[in-house]
Image: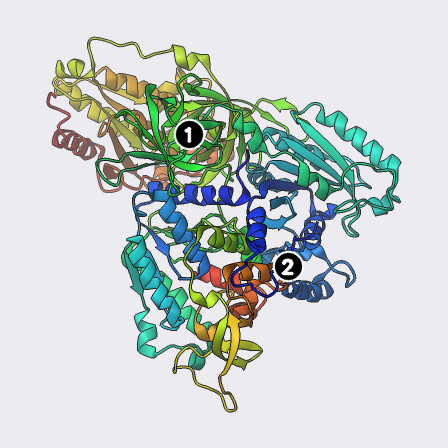
Amino acid sequence: MTLEAIPQAIDERDTDPSGLLDAAIRRRAGRTLLRLNTCGSVDDGKSTLIGRLLYESKAIYDDQLAVLETDSKKVGTRAGKLDFALLLDGLSAEREQGITIDVSYRFFSTENRNFIVADTPGHEQYTRNMATGASTADLSIILLDARKGVLTQTRRHSFLVSLLGIQHVVLVVNKMDLVDYSEEVFKTIEADYRKFAAQLELPAITCIPVCAVDGDNVTSPSERMPWYHGPSLMELLDNIEVDESRLLGSPFRFPVQWVNRPHLDFRGFTGTIVAGKVNKGETVRVLPSGRQSTVARIVTADGDLEQAIVGQSITLTLADEVDVSRGDMIVPADQPAEVADAFEATVIWMSESPLLPGRNYLMKIGTKVVTATVVPLKHKINVNTLERTAAAKLDLNEIGVVNLQLDRPIAFDAYKEIRDTGGFILIDRLSNDTVAAGMLHFALRRAQNVHWQAVDVNKTARSASKGQKPCVLWYTGLSGAGKSSIANMVDKKLHTMHRHGYLLDGDNVRHGLNKDLGFTAADRVENIRRIAEVARLMVDAGLIVSTAFISPFRAEREMARSLLGTGEFIEVFVDTPLHVAEARDPKGLYKKARAGELKNFTGIDSPYEAPENPDLRIDTTTTSPEDAADLVIELLEKRGFLSGP
Amino acid sequence: MNLSHLKRLEAESIHIMREVAAETEKPVMLYSIGKDSGVMLHLARKAFYPAPPPFPLLHVDTTWKFRDMYTMRERMAKESGMELLVYKNPEAIEKGINPFTHGSAVHTDVWKTQGLKQALDKYGFDAAFGGARRDEEKSRAKERVFSFRTAQHRWDPKNQRPELFRLYNTRKQRGESIRVFPLSNWTEFDVWQYIYLENVPIVPLYLSKLRPVVRRDGALLMVDDDRMPLRPGETPMMKKVRFRTLGCYPLTGAVESEAETLAAVIDEMLRARTSEREGRLIDHDAPASMEQKKQEGYF
């Protein structure tokens, strides 16, 4: 289990005449890699276990050991004995709090294998960290305290591990010393766990009784537990099959990262093979376009290859001039991935601001970035009980099953089959944060079968007959700011100019189309989504549409903008300070909100995110509605909306 | 038929570099001439082969590197066909900041930390590759591959994005920049093995040779030029030494060694019982000194 020392070429090191050194280095370089993650809390002795693995495999140097000895005496919890947990707690803030708060990566090796351990904390609020660590792991170690047995957190960890499709789970029953190394205790825990795990998709489970503090069954068999005949933890890690072997048998998948074009005679498509293998001369298909060609060359800096396999980063050239760009996927012509634009998926929510159905997120999958909308959130899953419940939103660390609608089709595989063509992240468009990890299940048939009905009379033809160009005047501002008054006046002016407008008013829409919606953040998002869709259809009909809604969230206004053609979305910010709007209070709503009779009222207990760069800003403290309407008409004239195309 | 550990690391680093080239506006590779930089440059050339890497090299110079390092720098710039930018903090030049008069902390802060920030601002780079590895030091173990810095170049360890699967979220706000560490998952040993197997050029100082050194504050310092003031009673002695890491020569301790070839260095490493950072004087200031420096913008 210790590092293999290279046989010493005694006198003639310079030349290594026996080639022993060279052979030893090459043998080491041929080791495989296993990535694992660990789940469990500090109380279960997780840091101690990993610290011990590092120590036993000689991954700790003397100077680090000296620091550990000092630290163990100073802040250790082992009465001056070596406290291996201290090896792992990296950031000073964490050391002071005595908890691990993030994902950290550790390295150790045996004679056969190198290991990368993602150490992830087990506290409830850190589901996100655990999912992160598990997303690249071949194997998960789930740790529990023999005195406590299978706890809620054990179930939670196992569920996450199964969601992320980990192939091997090792249940480490730690602190056997505190239950007198009892076989009976271990057997009961093992039976409990296997019973629970039967509900999950966990392909392989091994249970090991351990005492991490003293090293029993960590690297070598324990004399104190002669009744256990299975492998020690290290022995197991050393011999288990890695996930890449499984993926080698999958169909070839190659998401294109970068088109390499140093000169006119070379056009290479670079990327990492995420599944299967490819041969020179093989017939391939480019998705989503579906065009076919054959592999002309497999280029690497070390020379061309005849075949390349999963895990390799290579450059392909094709025999034909086909259009390929970043985000496309190259696949075997006879085993293509599916192409779709709507999916069912599981998402793990990782952001403080909740997932709201109807809101737009960026989705990165493989090398492609698309826009995704959650419609609808089907249910959320209680990570402790696996119970499914209906939900209007997902909060931080919650897990839900959703339908996703994308703005264009992508090539994919079910996450269960191939991790890298079915796993994705969602990104918030404004904060740019990674807000979710997701796993695609399957394409929704509906999306493949519902096509846009092609029509002969189009938008241009319809608007031309009215001598105008269609657009949406999107009025936004606080309740009582004057949006409806101004929009109404603009609509009248358009009418007298013989232009065809239509006013979608907030209150009116809520009486009909949106009467099923309330005023929670989730409902507000859906409210705006429907209005934006209606406005889009009306623009297609050739109309100049005015919408007068508070529309408090920037993200929804951006979504509405993204539904329309360039320049067709005109944001009019009716800027009225809160105290002015509240003083006007034309419908008496502010009074009610202040009295607590109206919940989620914008400006009072729900935020208003003002536009950063509106097309037009109207200060209603200095501009009358009449003048404001003129400003809007002026803008429409200036931008050519009031004359034909 | 699995890929070996090293081949997987190589493929992962190449993947990361291509993502940066594809998704950022103006990337740069920080080149410090050390072994990690050498491996990183080698990987970059592989990633974009047959084209040269689509970004320049940037060396934030302190003027106090070993002479062998400057020779190496020029050689690699020429060989790679990449543009080499050298930046020296003008304020440090003007004040003559050096490790002897000003101490290691001030020297490192003004030349390297401030110099790096100035250089990134001057050229407007929005992504910078660095050769840091997670096994180097505790606070690095939690560093992301893509590490976001504010417009003031500060690092916030509490506010890092999760990195899932092979997916890197490279989106950033205006003014923010990314430090990218393609060697995150490499260990010191992996680096040496790779250098050996791939014939990656390295500065000769990594191999043992008779060199003039003095023993000072417990470390062996090489007298690389006549700018090094000798203390009373100090006379340079010739010792067979090599370096495990390379930085500014007055701040980098040598180790006594017989290893004159790469294979011998690797052999010694396997028997070694101390970590490479021991030779770096910067880490010894305070237990969490590295993390502090990172928050301030040190690479």
- Which quarter of the rendered picture does the N terminus of chain B lie within? top right
Q: Is residue A519 in sight in this rendering? A: no
Looking at the rendered structure, whether the residues under marks 1 and 2 are on a common chain is answered as yes
Q: CA distance from mark 1 to mark 2?
A: 45 Å
Q: Name which residue lies at 50% across and 77% down.
A: B221
Please determine whether, in this image, residue A371 is positioned above or below residue A495: below
Q: Name which residue lies at 77% across and 46% down.
A: A220
Question: At which x and y percent is residue A530?
Answer: 38, 21
* Callout 2: chain: A
Please determine whether, in this image, residue B141 is positioned above or below residue A419: below
Location of residue A142 by image quarter:
top right
Q: Nearer the viewer, residue A338 or A227?
A: A227
Residue topped by disc 2: A96
Please determine whether, in this image, residue A403 is positioned above or below residue B112: above
Location of residue A98 by image quarter:
bottom right
- Which quarter of the rendered picture does the C terminus of chain B lie within? bottom left
- The amino acid type of the residue labelled 1 equals Phe
- The amino acid type of the residue labelled 2 equals Glu
Residue topped by disc 1: A254
Q: Residues within 10 Å of mark 2 (few under 14, many from 20)?
A: few
